[in-house]
Amino acid sequence: MKIAVIGTGYVGLVTGTCFANKGHDVICVDVIEEKIQKINEGTVPIFEEGLDEMLKDVVSKKKLKATLNMKEAITNSELIYICVGTPSKEDGAFDYVYLKDAAQKIGEVIKELDEYKVIVVKSTCSPGTTMNLVKPILEETSQKTAGKDFGLGMNPEFLREGVAIKDFLNPDRIVVGGIDEKSQEIITKSYEGFESPFLNVDPTTAEMIKIASNSFLAMKISFINEIANIAEKIGSDIQDIAKGIGMDDRISIRFLRAGLGYGGSCFPKDIQALHRQSVEMGVPSDLLKATMKVNEAQPLRAAEILIEEMDDRSLENRKIGVLGLAFKPDTDDVREAVSITLIEYLLERGAKVFATDPIAIKNFREILNHENLTLTSKVEDVLTDSDACILVTEWKEYLNLSPSTFKELMKIPLVIDGRRSLDAEKFRNEEITFKSIGLGR
Ligand code: UDX
């Protein structure tokens, strides 16, 4: 099929590249010339495992190209996926400025065309956005009618950063929210050959499925984090507890890893937006509110443990090492990362923070700068002469560090595992004071 993808951010680029890999002819559209150039050279402007090679391959086979020209892309495509960003506004609602702009430009182009096109919203948005915002803009600007002159639908993505290609090609389910049978059929056709189950619903339901899925996963994380905090007090290990809970098929072990909380570009903003919508609609969600509250407090658990361990209960002028800045391993993304909240707190308490990350330092520097914050690519610089060290992101390279390295380099061998990922026994055998989220022993 001929497919246009509007927006070459994270979702757009993965979507376009994977569709091209599946044999479709894809044209990606963006407003940033530099991005277009890079993509046409087969270079990925973002960090995502496997995307680089796949993009190079589809560009060289001429299955994917990028352009600034919306008209060219739409004219030459039967299916148009809108993948523009929907960031959070200050009040927590989604900002639809790019979505509106995309809908308007698409509408203007299809006004002049006779062929039937199907427009699909892939951007995450509040339930009702496709029908109440995108549809009216498209109809007004095109002077045409959705469901008659053009098709429309909502097809959410469930991509996790770092494994987005795998998630795109082998999804647990493909949710297709078309406004009518024809739209439904054409959207479904773009996934021909996928072996995943399909779920056909209306666009608003599709939007709700996406945002409620993320909310549920975040709720699972906040739940296990609360249980972890209790486990610490009762003298149990959250790893064993999560294992035991997760052995129940109805619950499953996935997303029951306790730690300093969730971050990233999706969970925090999706939950906030759904909570806001629930309040506006007069059905305020207590569970979503509690999920957010637990997550806001959780990064500070590491600081609390740290302060409890200090003989004078003070962090003033203490050198605190932080391992990991990205919101999770295998990404350079620091958006809403718990490292930000934690490091800010440590700095406020007068600590001298030395932090490292394999690839996220550059992005972190753009978010936080402070005279008492040193960002370094060297783990040794973080550990040397430190009063304590906190594991914030469970990168493999940190999990593989030998406890003796900590012991040799640190001034006070105090290690706080913020992700319940390190082997407590091994650390304690080295006479290191080892504390972890959810570890009460
Ligand atoms: C998430 C959803 O998983 C994906 O389906 C959606 O499309 C986008 O949002 P992503 O943000 O890439 O994906 O990361 P994910 O792997 O889900 O992790 C999100 C956050 O939760 C991370 O900060 C991670 O450290 C944390 N997390 C995850 C936990 O603290 N415990 C867990 O058990 C799982």
Image: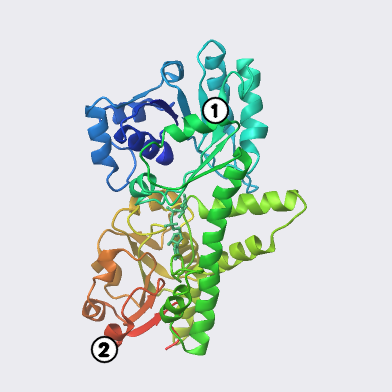
Which color scheme does this rendered protein use?
rainbow
Location of residue 375 (image quadrant): bottom left
Q: Earlier in the sequence, mark 1 or mark 2?
A: 1
**Amino acid type of the residue that numbered disc 2 sits on in the rendered structure:** Asn
Look at the image and tell me whether residue 381 can be seen: no
Location of residue 413 (image quadrant): bottom left
Q: Nearer the viewer, residue 266 or 388?
A: 266
Residue at the right extreme, as displayed: 282
What residue sits 42% from the left and 21% below the top?
Answer: 77
Mark 1 to mark 2 CA distance (whole Å):
65 Å
Task: Identify the element where label 1 is drawn.
Answer: helix
Q: Position of residue 11 (x, y in %)?
A: 43, 40
Pair 1/2: label in front: 1
Q: Which quadrant: the C terminus?
A: bottom left
What residue does disc 2 label? Answer: 429
* Number of marks drawn: 2
**Amino acid type of the residue that numbered disc 1 sits on in the rendered structure:** Lys
Q: Position of residue 241 (x, y in %)?
A: 46, 80
Q: Nearer the viewer, residue 194 or 274?
A: 194
Q: Nearer the viewer, residue 128 or 86?
A: 128
Q: Which quadrant: the N terminus?
A: top left
